[in-house]
């Protein structure tokens, strides 16, 4: 007997539609909303494309996770999302939590070839377009904005600075502190942390041997 294909929770054909609440002031919800109503833009997809969550409701649990949605009738993966009880409606979707920018290599069903591997919220997604366009200057300037103050900064002596790179690499490492000394201490420390953030963001690219970023 052939194994059954796994159901794509959130994009189950003939599944039960979940109510989607577009914002905290939405009291009724809807079984389908547009990308525009969710304030989401997807390249190549119309703002009027309908978003639906169709599920095979699990038994014995109040809320559960969904990993996909129908967007314009096509299956699209999203950042794992839990249903909630919203304004008294159980097993509902909070629209402001929907994120289609999150991609897992393990979930490619019905999607085009993926470029970026899975990453945490601090994986430097803000730098991706500049990295792919090879715009090093713009990427570096944006990377420096991802730098934060270090918890150890108060211990640093005068004329020195200590800041933290908040972007981790693909293995969850190298989000670390950098220091600077002298008149340009803060600028120097920020530049070092910015370069680390940029390098860490690049580590989330997949297929490095064929990816256009690494080809001459």
Image: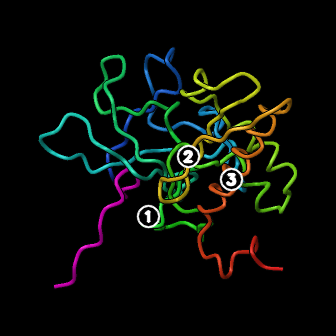
Element on which disc 1 rests? loop
Q: Residue drawn 49% across and 34% down? A: 97
Q: Which residue is mark 2?
A: 175
Quadrant hosting residue 169: bottom right
The residue at the point 74 percent across, 36 percent down is 145
Q: Tell me the distance, in whole angstroms, between the alpha carbons under discs 2 and 1.
A: 27 Å
Q: Relative to 4, does residue 89 appear above or below in the rendering?
A: above
Viewer-side label of 2, 3? 2
CB contact under 8 Å: marks 2 and 3: no
Query: To which residue does mark 3 refer?
Result: 45
Disc 1 from disc 3: Cα separation? 20 Å
The quadrant in which residue 99 appears is: top right
Q: Locate the C terminus and report the quarter of the image it occupies.
A: bottom right
Q: Mark 1 — residue?
A: 107
Q: For the magenta stretch, what is the residue range?
A: 1-13
* Disc 2 versus disc 1: nearer the observer: 2
- Going from N to C along the chain, the mark reached first, 1 or 3, is 3
Q: Is residue 146 shown above or below 5? A: above
Question: Sequence order check: which comes first, mark 2 or mark 1?
Answer: 1
Query: Considering depth in this image, is 185 or 109 the residue closer to the camera?
Result: 185
Residue furthest toward the bottom? 1
* Relative side of 42 to 24, left or right: right
In terms of image quadrants, where is residue 155? Answer: top right
Tell me the crowding category of disc 2: few under 14, some 14 to 19, or many 20 or more residues within 10 angstroms, Cα based: some
Above or below: residue 88 compared with residue 201: above
């Amino acid at each position: 007997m052939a194994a059954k294909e796994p159901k794509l929770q959130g994009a189950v054909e003939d599944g039960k539609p979940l109510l989607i609440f577009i914002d905290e002031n939405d009291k009724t919800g809807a079984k389908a909303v547009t990308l525009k109503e969710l304030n989401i833009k997807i390249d190549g997809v119309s703002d009027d494309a309908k978003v639906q969550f169709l599920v095979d409701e699990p038994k014995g649990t109040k809320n559960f996770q969904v990993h996909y949605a129908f967007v314009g009738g096509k299956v699209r993966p999203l950042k794992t999302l839990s249903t909630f009880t919203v304004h008294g409606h159980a097993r509902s979707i909070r629209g402001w939590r929907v994120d289609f920018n999150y991609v897992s290599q393990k979930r490619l069903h019905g999607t085009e070839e993926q470029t970026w591997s899975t990453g945490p919220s601090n994986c430097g997604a803000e730098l991706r377009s500049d990295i792919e366009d090879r715009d090093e200057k713009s990427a570096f300037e944006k990377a420096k904005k991802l730098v934060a103050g270090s918890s150890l900064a108060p211990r640093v002596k005068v004329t020195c600075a200590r800041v933290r790179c908040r972007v981790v690499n693909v293995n969850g490492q190298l989000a670390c502190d950098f220091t600077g000394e002298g008149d340009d201490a803060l600028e120097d420390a920020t530049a070092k942390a910015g370069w680390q953030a940029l390098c860490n963001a690049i580590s989330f690219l997949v297929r490095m041997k064929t990816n256009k970023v690494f080809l001459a």
